[in-house]
Image: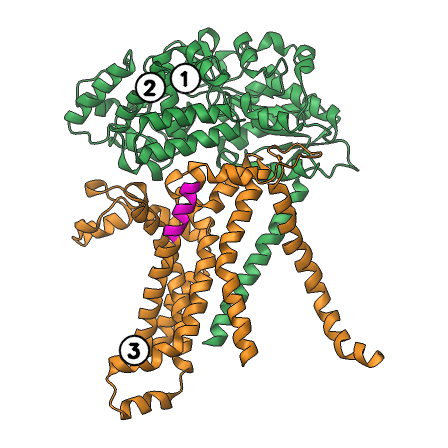
Amino acid sequence: MRGGLSKTFAVLGAAGLLAVSACGNSDDGGGSGDTATKDVTVFTWWADGGEKAGLDGLVSVFKTDCKDYNFVNSAVAGGAGANAKQVLANDLQAGKPPSTFQAHAGAELKDYINAGQVDDVSGLYKDFGLDKAFPQNLIDQLTVDGKIYSIPANVHRANVVWTNPDVLKKASIDATKAPATVDAWIADLTKLKNAGVKAPLAVSKGFAQEMLVEAVLLGELGTDTFNGLWDGKTDWAGANVTAALNKYKTLLSFTNVDRESIDWSDALGYVNKGQAGYTLMGDWVAAQQLADKVPDSKYTYWPSPGSAGTFQFLADSFTLPTNGQNPEGTKCWLKTVGSAEGQKAFNTKKGSIPARSDANAADYPKYQQTAMADWKKDKIAGSCAHGSACSAGQNNDILSALSQFSGAQDVAKLQTAFGTAMKTS
Amino acid sequence: MYGRIRTWGPGALVLLPTVLLLGYFVYGLIAWSFNTSLTDRHTARKGPADYVGFENYANLFGEERFLNSLKNLGVLTVAFIVGTLIFGLLWALLLEKGVPGESIFRSVFLFPMAVSMIASGVVWSWLLNPSQGDDARGLNRLFSILHLNFLENPWWTAGSRWTTMASIALPAVWQLSGYIMALFLAGFRGIPGELREAARVDGASEFKLYRHVLFPQLSPIALSALIILGHMSLKLFDLIYAITGPNQFRTEVPAVYMWNTLLRSDQAKAAAIAIVLLAVVAVLVIPYVAYTVRQEAEE
């Protein structure tokens, strides 16, 4: 018996050592470009699927436009950068930044800005003509204290509801028409529930709930008041916010009980399988539906109720780290990222739309074409769940408050938590 | 003089690397963390930070989220220790009575311990799916197939702190019960056969034999088990992270909260949480170490 036990311990111990040494290795991922200054180390979490294909497209453009430099891939796998952000934090802390790293455009960069880890790139916007190519209201959203710290490669839309027309038919609801308000949506959800659909609105954990509450706030408060929530111009304690949060509470009563334990793709699966009628999720769903070969006739989509004419955006962008390796090469990479050709090569593969307003819609699949048309004419709103409207720390506090709300629905407490979270940095 | 060095010199030389490494990587870094926890280093920005005394600690203990995580930890630890001891002792008793194929059962019960908590956590996150009735999945589905529908429950996603944290403790109990079984089994095997025989000759019933002869001999093992389980539970991170993800208020414990805090670069607060956690573990471990040292000295 003893021998068996100590062997088990030995194996466990060896596994532990391996894990430790693996962590040690990842530190080298940063930038050891002292000798090879031609290298441009690009840090992303695009390691597979459409994201990897998009990155490859970007790299092929980089290779023609920036012949003097070598692209070095420093991708760390893991959904939404969960692992990558840890590795990046280590590298930045150790003073070994990559040549450039991926980050959500907007307020999420605040943490890096406050820590003095990224440089102002507004000069590059003028040099590359990006101040003309990107819509002005996007530039307004990206500007922090008069400076811009990253160049967006793409744009996704967050406020989209995806439906299953076959399910909606059960309650004679027209799936092609968006309910005009959140109240009208709640009325439709009630009809569906009465028609025997137990959980007509599919929701998943974490950021999906945050997106839903943001969509309700956006629909109820209107674009300007909603944007004011994140930049301090709108009071979180207001009665209009209370009313909207109460509607969010009502919406939750129409959702699946396992919402805390599933991912957004599972929630989408509930809709596709006919267990649910609606799910609210960003427009990466379109790429997922294409990949899963769900025919166009089997789903419809519209802007979340009350938010038609507003494009709630999130964007992946690249930065210029302070004291990074090879800043000239990095600038060439950033030029590629912002260029019409680079954005086309990236977005046609990743399933997002270009941030530039001069792209040719005919190059893109069906959903993206409508999104591009909206991007040109709609008002723009930020998203806290995806980093364009608040910092990582604020987002962290809000996610915690929402998970608490999911279990015990106390609107007053949630409202206070939102206000407190936005007062921190 | 030379003779004296010959006595303690080689020993000291062998110990030196360990002392240096432990001194730097454990105690040195604990001191570093404690130092950080007294500053206002709330971003990743480098350069000097100001000392703010125990302000970070005061803030922590005035914060609902941290107090919630401490309460969760307390409940988790009780549920985990009680569950593991019950199952470990039960299995040890069953095997101790002698079953055919004992070594197979021993391995079967012990194997879960070899699975990494992050891997078992992923699987348990599927097993603990809260859907019930027709949509039931995971364990709830198993219950409904077995017509034990009354056992279906929402696991950690609803209900009181006790049911929530007991659901989280369940996978940990599954993983560690085999280890406790092995400890107790070794304890049973270490008791000389003469003692049992003597008790039986004196006419003790089987129950009395266990109650008055065997169990008292196991108390040092039970104490070790308690300490090992206790400090494992206090440091539990990976299992909770894998089952419920980050930022889950219902199941957050200080270790997960510390990770979250560090991810947002609030180094001072994260260090303060780490030091509180260390203090909680120390409360459990130091008396035990003192006790064993005294015991050994007496022997």
The residue under the point 48% across, 71% down is A5
Instruction: Tell me if residue A57 can be seen.
Output: no
**Can you tell which mark lies on residue A242?**
2
List x then y, in percent, for residue A250: 26, 24
In the rendered image, which quarter is residue A60 located in? Answer: top right
Task: Give the color scheme: rainbow, by chain, secondary structure or one colour.
Answer: by chain
Instruction: Tell me if residue A111 can be seen.
Output: yes
Marks 2 and 1, the one that precedes in the sequence:
2
Quarter of the N terminus of chain A within the rendering? bottom left
The residue under the point 68% across, 43% down is A28
In this figure, which residue is indicated by the disc labeled 1? A366
Q: Amino acid at mark 3?
A: Arg
Identify the magenta region: B67-76
In the rendered image, which quarter is residue A210 located in? Answer: top left
Q: CA distance from mark 1 to mark 3?
A: 76 Å
Above or below for B97 versus A52? below
Above or below for B267 versus B98? above
What SS does tag 3 mark?
Answer: helix
In this figure, which residue is indicated by the disc labeled 3? B211
Compare residues A95 and A65 and report the one nearer the observer: A95
What SS does tag 1 mark?
Answer: helix
Crowd rating for badge 2 (residues with CA inside 10 Å; few <14, some 14–19, many 20+): some
Do marks 2 and 3 share a chain?
no
Q: Colour of chain A?
A: green
Q: Chain of mark 1?
A: A
